[in-house]
Amino acid sequence: MIAELGHFALIISLAMAVLLSILPLVGASKNNTALMNSARPLSWAMFLLLAFSFCILLWAFYTNDFTVSYVANNSNTQLPWYYRLTAVWGAHEGSLLLWVLIQAGWTVAVATFSRGMPQESVARVLAVMGLISVGFLLFIILTSNPFLRTLPFFPVDGRDLNPLLQDPGLIIHPPMLYMGYVGFSVAFSFAIASLMTGRLDTAWARWSRPWTTAAWLFLTLGIALGSWWAYYELGWGGWWFWDPVENASFMPWLAGTALMHSLAVTEKRGTFKAWTVLLAISAFSLSLLGTFLVRSGILVSVHAFASDPSRGMFILGFLVFVIGGSLLLFAVKGAAVRVRGNFDLVSRENALLTNNILLMAALVVVLVGTLLPLVHKQIGLGSVSIGAPFFDMLFAWLMIPFSFVLGIGPLIRWKRDNLSSLAKPMAVSAVISIVLAGLFNWIFSDYFVFMTYLGWLMAMWIVVLHCFELYERATHRHSFFTGVRKLQRSHWAMMFGHIGLAVSIIGIAMVQTHSIERDVRLAPGDNFQLEEYNFYFSALRDKDGPNYDGYIADFEITLDGKYINTLHAEKRFYRTARSMMTEAAIDRSLTRDLYVAMGDRLDDNKSWAIRIYYKPFVNWIWAGSIIMSLGGAIAISDRRYRFRKNANKQEA
Amino acid sequence: MSKKLLFVPLVAFLALAAVFTTQLVRNSEGDDPTKLESVLIGKSVPEFRLEDLAEPGKLYDQAIFKGEPLLLNVWATWCPTCYAEHQYLNTLAGEGVKIIGLNYKDQRDKAVGWLNDLGNPYLISLFDGNGMLGLDLGVYGAPETFLIDADGVIRYRHVGDVNPRNWKEKLEPMYQQLVAEAK
């Protein structure tokens, strides 16, 4: 009975979404205030019904209600309660429900925090968001209903949640990622709404900015979490695999990053409008495309979602409707919003345009790399695989001009600047960067690799020029310490965003070239020497968990005879799912990770294949992402975006 | 810039949608993109660490496939077709074809006895007792033979026994091409 209530709530929320996508639009075109005002209560109704439905699914998992087939397929009584709850989004149906719940959550957020916006705009934006919800709700109800019953023959116990997913990292990774994906629907809806009216002013950009930044923040954290999870849970020691699903999350990120910067130009200078709108459409379209690629079974990936042709066709139809429709709208109405920019070759506008072009180039690389195997096979050329080397190489080359422009961009003035005023700081910074990069490279790595040096150089270039810019800006009118305190939040946001990227670049450069990976055969009592670190396999213990049998291998690590840490690498056999899992043990520090993972037990029943990795600076990759997201958070908190107060002031 | 430029994103997207539709239709007609053909051909041999068949404790990894073109033959003593195939593998080995054996889900002593009795065509014999490498390779059953080039990339997969007819018709030309490429 309870599951049927959830199903019922789902259907009513679809009705609400349908109303939401129609009534306010009608109201906006007929200038009917009552209809336009219906947008907010309808958003709330849709959200609350979905939240109710989601809670019921949570309850079904919590109480082990195996009469619901989705529960029976993804959870069992042996699973601890917190993994039973997170199992809700462990597979296709539940994760879609989470997706649409988050979509409704963003809709409600827009409804709540947009009181300063004209009623007509709010009505249109909410209607577009409602339309997107309609698509996803139809998809869930028609092809992927999580409330279907197994009756009358329900199982006594369920199948296990995929053991890979039984990890704290996975409790928050998908919700974060979805917050990001779906968050771009806000900027998308703003863009569509303003294309409908043909009115695109700087206020539009100002309203879109905090939403875009928020979505970008979540997506950044989501991607970083996923990468971190893959690193410690999959036991491969890699942090990014250029897997189609990773690429699917990376493409909206690239488009979203470009969008944030382009919105800045549109807000401050009133130019780049058509381009910004196109980016807003792309960022969300790429999120949808990602979902499609993951769930349609079109590409081969390690993230296997159950694929089903009818689902694929449904999403594809939805994709054509949403993306095709919005691009058509863009093609027809785009000319109306275009503004001829008035700026010189050397200007902040052009620096940001270059940044955008490079981000788009990166996006094209990822898109082509992900889809080429598919096209290649279709036109009869056979199977090809595009591996990490392709992406690694192209990204390395794209990063060089990108970091160069990133370093000097903030120093260039809007509209017009001349290079001669920049020549001196650039030359000085170049010298400092070259020296610093050489120094750090010499301190932190035993041997010289050009790509590592290049990475340090790019990072130093960004850091040095941003420090210079900070100093210039702070001492413009005041002494340095007074000036620093008077800087706007949005300025700090930029600082954090850019420095975060520099930190990540350092991490990537170091880990890609200076990692050491060894597969060795070790029995308890054996020693293994990796560079100056000694790994002593001190003991092998049994450790059984609630739903698995496991072994733990203890490794004592010493550095030149000094004790550092004892690592406990685990191997688990999940009984219900009948699969083996590796829990790597990692000794973390600022400049390196020591990573021990157990492989298979070898034939003599004593020794094991053990993977021992040395990963320099790997944590910097994620630290950089966190710093970047912090920048995003600071940007959102900037006073300029609290539109309620602002707008009231303007009206008064 | 003309107005037509604004249609470019739409056209690009529709082209993409056409590609997806084609693939979805093919998928529903039974073309499974996860099939081995599209997964492993053109990729390097999966990473592995396996023991030597005759000498437990002696470990090999994927590096053994680098350097020259090789055949990787998956076999087991429980497989009658492998028995039929074995004599011809000996002949091929006699002609200088380099073959690596993967003893798949088998018992070590039986397998060693088999090679002692019937002759050993393999340069290296890997022991995959629990079938982990076989799983990574997507082996359906024994015998299967993979053509691997000098860079350790899988180029072709042959299911069933290698016999004089299919060797001459299909496998040898490909093998000779790999040998020529390696030079």
Image (cartoon, coloured by chain):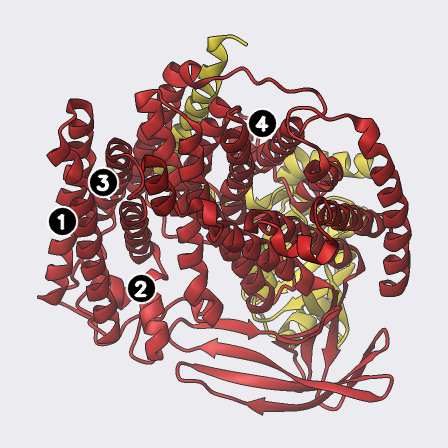
Instruction: Find out whether the residues at labels 4 and 1 contact each other: C-beta distance under 8 Å.
Output: no
Residue A185 coordinates in the image, percent (x, y): 37, 40
Mark 1 or mark 2: which comes first in sequence? 1
Residue position for label 2: A88
User: Does A558 sit above or below residue B103?
Assistant: below
Disc sitting over residue A11 in the figure? 1
What amino acid is labelled 2 in the image?
Answer: Val
Q: Residue A366: in sight, yes or no?
A: yes
Q: Secondary structure at mark 3?
A: helix
Same chain, labels 4 and 1: yes
State the CA–CA distance, disc 1 to disc 2: 19 Å
Question: Where does residue B28 sit, x and y in percent of width and height?
Answer: 34, 37
Query: Element type at marker 1?
Result: helix
Q: Nearer the viewer, residue B155 or A506?
A: A506
Q: Which residue is mark 4?
A: A381
User: What subunit carries mark 4?
Assistant: A
Q: Tell me the residue at 21%/46% (across/down).
A: A43
Subunit ID for the residue under disc 1: A
| Tint of chain B | yellow
Q: CA distance from mark 3 to mark 2?
A: 21 Å
Instruction: State the residue in front, B36 or A75.
Output: A75
Q: Mark 2 belongs to which subunit? A: A
